[in-house]
Image (spheres, helix red, strand yellow):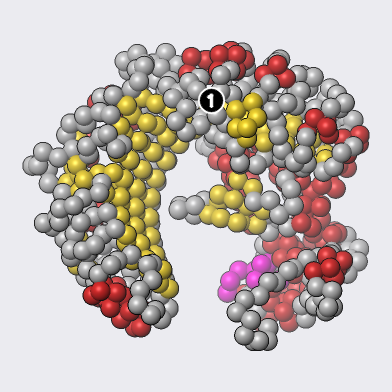
Amino acid sequence: MPDKNNGSRVLITTRFENVAMKADTKYDPYKLPTLDHEQSLNLFLKKAVPKKHQYLDGLPDELKSLAQEFVAKCRGLPLALIVLGSLLSTKPYDFHGWKGLLDTMSWQVDGSECIDVIATSYEYLPLAKKLCFLYFAAYPEDKEIEIKHLLRIWVAERLIPQEDTRTLEETAMCFLEDLVQRSMVQVSYKGFDGSILYCRVHDVLRDLAIQKAKEINFLIVCSKPNDWMSCSQARRVAINYSSNVNELMGDYANPNIRSLLLLGDQSNLDCSKYKLLRVFGCITEWNDWGQRVVLRNFKGLPHLRYLKLNSAIKGQEREFGEWIRSMKYLETLDLGKSDHGDLSTWIWQVKTLRHAILSYDCNTQAPPTSADLTNLQTLINVNYGESRPASGPPNITEVRNLRIEVRNFSMEELITLLHNLKHLVNLHIRISGIDLGKIIWKNFPFYENLKCLVIKMGYDTEGVLTTDIDGNETLVLRDDTLPPHLIYLQLRGFKFVSDPLSVLQKLQNLKTLYIFSKKEKVLMSWRFRCSAGGFKQLEELLIDNLMVDEWEIERGAMPMLKRLVVQFCDPLRVPLELVHLPSLKALEWNTDIETNKDMIRSICKQRPDVEYFGRSYGDD
């Protein structure tokens, strides 16, 4: 783009020429040309063949002419090249594998979308994966789709086959990863462990999903009033219409409907007439507390397996709980964006539950000892302690994701509970209102699957953390008892009386570390120390509110660190050794100390590749 000293620009991209024409009436829109043959070949080979063969001369002789034919058929359209190349990567890397695909494909290319080329990748999917792909039609164009919700819906729809060595959710994730590998789905965001958190589909592939879903009467998308008239036999309906849903669905009484996914208000929609409903939920994440659920609209529905409500239930807990307790097949209860009180009297009697997500601070008590929840994998936002359940742990041995608040609950009981959860992957504990006593880290059971650990101390709880086993402190860290496969660790609200980094640096797989101390006014007598070879995999480090004045970093420490954030830690001096961190890309250090500001200037001058964020100072 020409540099006209504008300071900033707005770039609009669209496939619709009329949109581009209206964006700026003074100038004709720039029409992006298709790729030339060489560019097309490079893109195709990048997706289709192993890395060492990603150039024409690196191909076996019998594949060179076939590669040229595939590229020519795609007419320079990037999406067609990507999808076709990804499809070929799943075929045998030989003449028969490539020739067989070339001979069986439909090549009715119109020069604009290559929909027939792209559809070939869909046709080669196994039936179960075809149906999973068709579910993307339910989401609005360009929607960032949260993976955990999508996979739970696939499971509830019985689209995922049972495998001996995996849970249904793990198999569903494998299906999704296969669609990503085929370039039919794009990854938007990944988690700390590299797992997919959000995805999206290209609008052309979404159009394909809508078309194919309608052809086989799998799913119908309603985007405006009266669209439902074409849904008389549809078993699944997606309402991509954010206004009054009753206006759209008021007279729609298709008795065959199995799934109903909504973009807008759920509160007043009468679902009681859809007796075969198995999936009901909102596909947006904002809360809808201004609307209360009208429970009479949900009476019946004996086959419901998936329920996600964003509207408020407050004041109707008993009626709602009695309804939930009557469910014989419910697998997912997602009230994370709803507003409700304690539901523990009823929901723990649903033995089929796989995922229970409750709203933050809802005061729902954890399952009692008598609960038989052997299918439960996700348990979010429950309390241990208040209205304490009967002694002994509940039968929730399959839980992978656990987020609990511990109030007035003995740590011995908590440790007993954790000892039974051998499949834990993510554990969040918020501790408040109790006297912890002394806890040695080795008392906590950490299994090989545990990747994420968050421990938060409440404002009313005194938690003191040390590395000295002979002290009288609350939590003792020992390098020989740390969870070995931890990737993400957050310690919040402790008072640190010795250096935590000197011990935590021995976690070989740790990638993210957040340390938040209770606000202190007294300078600690110890210093931070990172030894050579310490924090081998650490990529992000945040330190907050620690009153320490020195940080020693040896050469070879934190070789993978990309982002460092230090805040409210004055008088901690900025170590010059930050210059030698080879992977550092972002530095945020908030300080009022002039020597620290000078040191940051020096570091930024020596490392222009490091972007600095923080409180502005001087004339910089």
* The magenta stretch spans residue 544: no
Please state the horizontal and vertical placement of residue 457, each as a whole percent of the image.
30, 39
Residue 239 coordinates in the image, percent (x, y): 77, 38
In the displayed structure image, the side of residue 155 where residue 34 appears, left or right: right
Residue 337 appearing in the image: yes
Q: Residue 439: x percent and y percent? A: 19, 35
Pick the quarter of the image with the N terminus.
bottom right
As displayed, is residue 250 above or below residue 481? above
Indicate the amino acid at tag 1.
His
Residue closer to the observer: 99 or 477:
477
Q: Which residue is mark 1?
A: 340
Q: Is residue 226 left or right of residue 237?
A: right
Q: Which stretch did the figure color magenta?
A: 44-52
Looking at the image, which residue is at 45% across and 53% down?
192
Find numbered disc 1 in the image and state the secondary structure of the residue it sits on. loop
- Outermost residue, left direction? 470
The answer to which of 361 and 148 lies nearer the viewer is 361
64 to 103, vertically: above or below? below
Give the side of residue 563 with respect to residue 580, left or right: right
Residue shown at the point (59%, 24%) measured from the top left: 313
Tell me the quarter of the picture where residue 120 sits: bottom right
Q: Main secondary structure of the magenta part?
A: helix
Please say whether residue 51 is one of the residues in the magenta stretch: yes
Report if residue 509 is visible in the image.
no
Q: Nearer the viewer, residue 283 or 138?
A: 283
